[in-house]
Amino acid sequence: MASDDWQPFESLLSNIVDNRGRTCPTTPTGIPLIATNCVRNDLLYPTYENVRHVDPEPGDLLFVTKGTPGRVCMVPDPVDFCIAQDMVAIRADVKKVYPRFLFALLRSREVQELIEQLHVGTLIPHFKKGDFDKLVLPIPDRKLQEFIGDTYFDFSAKIELNRSMNETLEAMARALFRSWFVDFDPVRAKAEDRDPGLPKPLADLFPDSFENSELGEIPRGWCASPVYDLATYINGAAYRAFEPNEERRGFPIIKIAELKAGVTAQTRFSDVKMPDKYRIEDGDVLFSWSGNPDTSIDIFVWNHGPAWLNQHIFRVVPNSAHERAFVLMTLRSLLPVFAEVARNKQTTGLGHVTVEDLKRLLAVRPPKPVLLGWNTLVEPLLARSFGLEGEDNTLAGLRDALLPKLISGELRIKDAARLPYSEKLVQA
């Protein structure tokens, strides 16, 4: 990183809010307590997943100091949470550094590597507040700081907006799935001589009565089918069979880590010729069936280009194209069941869902006309969601590729401003 001015991290801060050593009493409801698991480098603001409830200011940065030190998020406006121990809220001294630039700088790969070199502790890494002055950062002129900071923020804000839209689209698809295939709302409405609230061509697809099945009461004419019969499940190949290389030759090898984070610097590649059944493409449904029941058993839609599939992950191939959305939502609706199956077999922290389990577990299966009608409503939602996720991947790749070039001076402001992404962000 090139700069005429290098300054200790601590000297760039006007305030550090540290709750170290003080664990707040928590309750099921109230003001969210943001812990380290809520701070991730792929999000602009902290996530509220698995929060507890119980004084940072908008624009401050949340900086993790223990576990995975260096993860950083921005504090939103309004602030509706408190922070736990093992992290600090830091406030940039605006006279010395532009806050958004400091955020982008701390997120950069080069600074993340510097922080990693300053870790102490073997089992649980720490980056102590007392060592902040050992992290020396490059501080360019103010104009460049503002351009870098605002550009990074704009990229991140657009990605955040896409994610919010994506969550809305997926929620709509889940709600429709539950209405049609779990609660059977259209059938119940017709059975009670009520309007099912659907266009007549769709309403006519549903029966007006129920019958008993191995799953209990289901719409007349529908069936209870083994989950295994909904699709073909192709397990990935053994990792060593790909002869992994670090030179990034060929396609990336996709393990559970890549399902969660995408293709990263830690991902290994392979240029070995393997059977086509192990190759995955954008849009493929993937089912990670082995690992920690609470964190590894999951259903994904791949969206990172051609790749090789490692074992312990199924590529799920629906029996026909119009069944893809139904199969995807059915598998996702069964995730709690899959997790419980894996938990019941758990040894040394790991569990699994086997083909035999998929043959034993049942799911409702409607007739083809209902599936076609469902597909006309849901496939556009999922296609839009998939497109937003692909756009996010592109934006994140551009953002993370531009950042080191701007910080080092390899790319000048006037050159960066001419790149296609600038117009796209403004239009967004």
Image: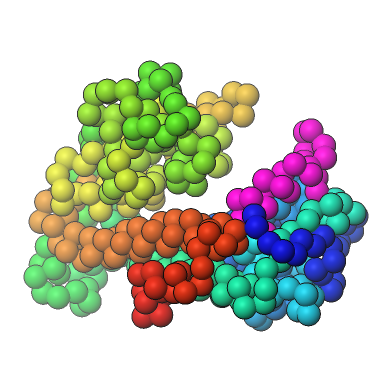
Instruction: Determine the image quadrant of residue 240.
Output: top left
Quadrant of the image containing the C terminus: bottom left
Q: As displayed, is residue 79 above or below residue 295? A: below
Q: Is residue 215 above or below residue 52?
A: above
Q: For the point 56% across and 41% down, which residue is it?
A: 294
Q: In this rendering, does residue 203 appear at all?
A: yes
Residue stretch rendered in magenta on the structure = 106-127
Left or right, residue 171 beside residue 19: left
Residue 67: x and y in percent read 73, 45
Who's the residue at 36% across and 62% down the image? 391
Left or right of residue 164: residue 375:
left
Vertical placement of 196 versus 272: above or below? below
Q: Residue at x 74, y 59 (%)?
A: 137
Viewer-side residue, 89 vs 314: 89
Name the residue: 62% across, 78% down: 143
111 falls in the magenta region: yes
Residue 245 on image: x %, y %: 44, 26
Give the quarter of the figure containing the N terminus.
Answer: bottom right
Q: How many marks?
A: 0
- Where in the figure is residue 51, as x and y percent of width and height? 67, 60
Tell me, yes or no, whether the highlighted magenta stretch contains residue 125: yes
- Whether 182 is drawn above or below 147: the answer is above
Q: Is residue 84 visible?
A: no
Residue 107 horizontal/vertical position (percent) = 62, 58
In this view of the protein, which residue sits in the foreground, 180 or 130?
A: 130
What is the basis of the colouring in this image?
Answer: rainbow
Q: Say which quarter of the image contains residue 31.
A: bottom right
